[in-house]
Image (tube, helix red, strand yellow):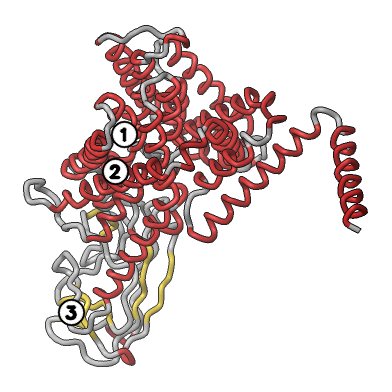
Amino acid sequence: GKFRYDRRGMASHAVLDNAWSSLPPTILPMLKLIGMLGLVRAWGLFLHLGSTGSGIFGEVCAGFIMGPNSQNVAPYQEGLRGIGLLGIFLAAFEDGLYTDLEFFQFVTLPSFLVGTIAPALSVGLGIVALNAVGIGWIEASCACVALAAAVPGRARVRWDRKGWQACGVLRDQVGQVISVSTCISTFVALTTVSVVKGMAKNENLGYRSWGVWDLLQPAIVSIGLIVISVFLRLAITSADAGRLLSQISGKTTRSGMGGSFVVLMLAVAVGMIIFAETLRSTSILGAYCAGIVFSGIPGARVGWEHNTRNIVPWLLKVYLACTVGFTIPKRTWVWKEDALAGFFVGVVALFGKVLGGAMASLPFLGGVEVPLRVAQSLQIGTAMSVHGHIGIFALTQISVRGLVEQVSDSAVLWGLLYGSLLGPAMFEAACQLEIKTAEMQNTDPERELDLPYPAVAVKELPHETIALESVEVGTPAKDMRANVLKYQRVAEPAPSPYIQVPNNQPYAPPEYTDVAPAPYAPYVTNGTPSYNEYAAAPQYPQNVPAGYALVVPNMESLEPPSTM
């Protein structure tokens, strides 16, 4: 029986070998490649749905597991690497496209200082941590700049509906610090990628030893490229040019021909990439700056999202799995020293960002009106780890040019993977903590909720004596029209010095006849219920909690709520 079993097993293996050998030479590697991409997709869905984390960790792991073991895929590695680089360039262009530079006009000086200090603390503490585990200062500096890289545009897009809106849009203090920190850290990381070209030590790649000018020239060119892209953005979004381009992009998007405008943007991106490479900068910075050029055109983002929403994510998967995953040494994953060092470095870098956010409440940074709570400091620190593909790209470029030894390479890669896995989940948890903190403060029965202006106050009233109804007028926030809240008359007499709405009728302000420029809200005069004057009025609460009513003092006019 044993002999017959062995014969059957050998026969079955022979049949399988004949079946595999009968396949064309190109079918087997393609099947393995399809299987690897399927595993990448499964990992990404599991991590995104199960832990709200980024799929970078699973994508890199899938490439590491299947790539080195699939020798037949090796002839296609160069082609896959080219496809992956195309994906990283498109992702960099998309990140620049979603970078809102108009936000900087609302940034205060304290927020700018804190936003600058946060990534600097992250880099500095990371350098100290790597040096503590035996890595040189130059190698540690290059590696930690890659570790601190963040993506402001992608962080805003990914968490806009779940986190940013719930925690307060980016015009509050927390949003200012987050936006400034992510922009500065990304600019520094992309500039560092260009600087390492002059610092490269690998003679086999044709690079020579570096000098001071080798460091200054790419840095100056990169900063100049960023400045040029900002000026180009201001030029094309001027009164006439911006209106014309918005009409063109909007019409092409509505008519289903948005691809033509996307092709135009990509042509400009290719030109800026060539220009950046010619001036000894880096191509990914050229792609990012090309996105900044078109970031002020509203229809550009709509057309880009409509035509590339299913392409860029898959190209990024190919880059992470087939470019990064194929080249990771096995010792990176099996040696616990690298994993522990990466965890240490990643935690230290994240702590630097959180500490930088907490510095916004220090007294010497004058102008900060509201001190940050713990949840808000956590938001600042964790928001910069939402996506790490630019950091991984910077790390691979630095490593290829021989500036980072294998130990620091492995540690920083582990730190990036930890950040991409834990950062989004921690950011969402910080947002939920902030929401719960605000709800606890608003529903405290012993606390009187005073608005930051003397005209109107919210007082506690019995639950059964109030009825609220929300009426939305216009489109809030987008065209600067407000949400008008209509409040029913309170049954019980209002305490002095407050008055009730007369005749037991609900008070509803008339519809707007004009749009107030930011940061002003439409103003109602005492004599005429019209909107012909503007006043710099603070915001009203968007929702009055249960048991509270909006009452108006004597001899005062009621200014409608504003979403600004």
- The front one of 311 and 410 is 410
In this view, 475 is above or below 341: below
Quadrant into which the N terminus falls: bottom right
Q: Picture quarter containing residue 551?
A: bottom left
How far across and how far down the image is residue 528, in percent? 26, 64
Q: CA distance from mark 2 to mark 1?
A: 8 Å
Residue that mark 3 sits on: 447
Please state the horizontal and vertical placement of residue 59, each as a whole percent of the image.
56, 43
Asked if residue 533 shows in the view, the reply is no
Q: Is residue 231 left or right of residue 90?
A: left
Indicate whether 14 appears above or below 422.
above
Classify residue 291 as left or right of residue 553: right
Q: Which mark is residue 349?
A: 2
Tell me what residue is drawn at x 25 percent, y 39 percent: 129
Q: CA distance from mark 3 to mark 2?
A: 39 Å
Mark 2 neighbour class, 10 Å CA radius: few under 14, some 14 to 19, many 20 or more = many
Which residue is drawn at the image coordinates 48% and 41% (left, top)? 333
* 3 up-or-down from 492: above or below: above
Residue 131: image x %, image y %? 24, 33
The answer to whether the residues at label 2 and label 1 have Cβ atoms under 8 Å apart is yes
Among the two numbered marks 1 and 3 on one chain, the one whose residue lies closer to the N terminus:
1
Q: Mark 1 highlights which residue?
A: 144
At label 3, which amino acid type do we have?
Arg
Residue 422 left/right relative to 181: right
Name the amino acid type tagged 1: Cys
